Image (cartoon, coloured by chain):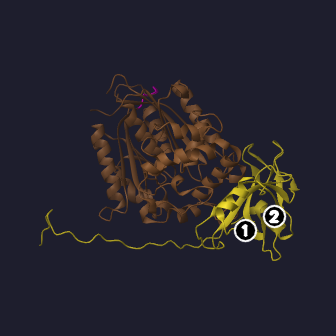
Amino acid sequence: MAELTADQEPVPPLTIAGHWDFRYQYFAGDAASRFFHELGNGRIMGTLCPQCQRVLVPARGFCDACYVSTTDWRQVGDRGRLETFTILASRFPGLPDPPVVIGYVTLAGASTALLNFVLGLDLTDVEAAATRLLAQPAVEVRFRDQREGRITDFFFQLADA
Amino acid sequence: MSSSPAGAAADSVQKVYVHGTAVHRSWADRSASLTDLIFSATRTALERASIRWRDIDSVVLGAHDVTDGRSLTSMVTAPAAGAYLKDEIRLGEDGASAFVLGTAQVRSGSCGACIVAAWGRASESDPDAVAAALFDPFFSQPLGLTEITVSALRAGAALARYPGYQEWRGPAGARRRAAAGVEARRPAVQLPLRSGELPVWSDIVAVAVLSAQPGPVEVRGVGMSTEPYQVGDRDLLGLPALSQASGQALRSAGCAVGEVGVLELDGLTLFDEALALEAVGAASAGDGMRVLAQRSDINADGGFAAGYCAPAMGLVRICAAAGRLTGGSDLALATGSTVVAAQGQAAIVLSRNQGGG
């Protein structure tokens, strides 16, 4: 039987490729399902916390700050201020080609901020675009003509665009 | 040395000491597997602690399956961290949270000596793609949220509210650029964040060895807290979970942040570090970036720019704090933030044990 000693000729380190590709089906649950259904109707809905009276958007079944179930539904407005943003420079599957702007907006009547794409902005000079967005401009919701009950059924657009 | 809490009553509360630490940073070292790296760092920490492996009672691990690319990764990696036939706790959290649990085990008297280990190997995957998978599939993934993206959103909010952040980001970032590793290992720029403000990905293993026996550094206080999952619900600038966790740690240690000489605060980017300074009370609201620019002793190794990979970083900061205490300062505060996008925070107050150990 052959023996190996510590001073053997080194061998090339082995590297093998790995890839995870499992299939899942995610259940949105009642609250989110209704939220997405209402997007299809061109409405953005939140749920009311009976304790802190916040209107939580996107709608959810409970308030994690008060730890109680939400009760009533509220439609929120279609305008707000761009509270913060970033310009995505990386290409991700399912996303438009970069540069892409996403940002958080607390819509009128909502208590929490909602994330979505910010479209209609000239991005040929991203530094100039970033400077403009840092001023936290007013934005409004625009629904797409073809809606499929997903968060991407709408986007934000600068109100003065 | 004996590691068991000999002579202690079953209901007594033990003091907890850090006896040895190790932080190993590398990048795509093809001669070492992940378990090789974990074993090497753990052996180093045990040697520095002068504690034999057979005297270790328990092991607490901080690791992420998706970061490691191994389903239930601790099944594969735990023995490399010394867990064979030991009491073992596996956390899908930052290493600072693992350190808190390890402290609790020793303090409760349920074990005498404990290994805490955390790691991440960014060179084996794409950290941005892994981070995207952490977010929910309904509201966040379709819009491209990642850990870096949320930090960029946080930076945008800071720049909009605090004029000092624009004024001081250059000087603060320059110090981080000087300490930085390889530029190619930074993620793609996401405005308003700039390249020098982004982390340098790294392969990192951090290990701390705790014991009830007196040692050079004592664990004086710990705290943990969690924010809402939804980023739109959060106070992106106030980091309330970090304020609460650090406040809890300082109160249990019986000291104020002003008495703390060593600050080691986990932050994914320059802005996260600056805002963390404000959250723990070491800077007033809006002044964190200036303080970060003017105090080179905060995250003295270069912080996020010295090499970053979740979920090791909280434990990296704790190890750095313990090392700096033995160099002269009396009190240290270290923090670690955990997924997703600093939703969870842990804080630890350490003190130099005047009696040594």
Chain holding disc 1: A
Q: Which chain is brown?
A: B
Residue B316: x, y in percent? Answer: 43, 45
Quadrant for the N terminus of chain B, please.
top left
Q: Which mark is residue A34?
A: 2
Q: Which chain is yellow?
A: A
Residue B12 is one of the magenta-drawn residues: yes
Residue in the image at 57% along x and 52% along y: B339
Residues shaded magenta: B11-16
Horizontal placement of B300 versus B44: left or right? right
Chain holding disc 2: A
In terms of depth relative to the viewer, which is nearer, A42 or B330? B330
Quadrant for the C terminus of chain B, please.
top left
Dot 2 or dot 1, earlier in sequence: 2
Q: Which mark is residue A82?
A: none
**Magenta stretch, overall SS:** loop
Picture quadrant of residue B239: top right
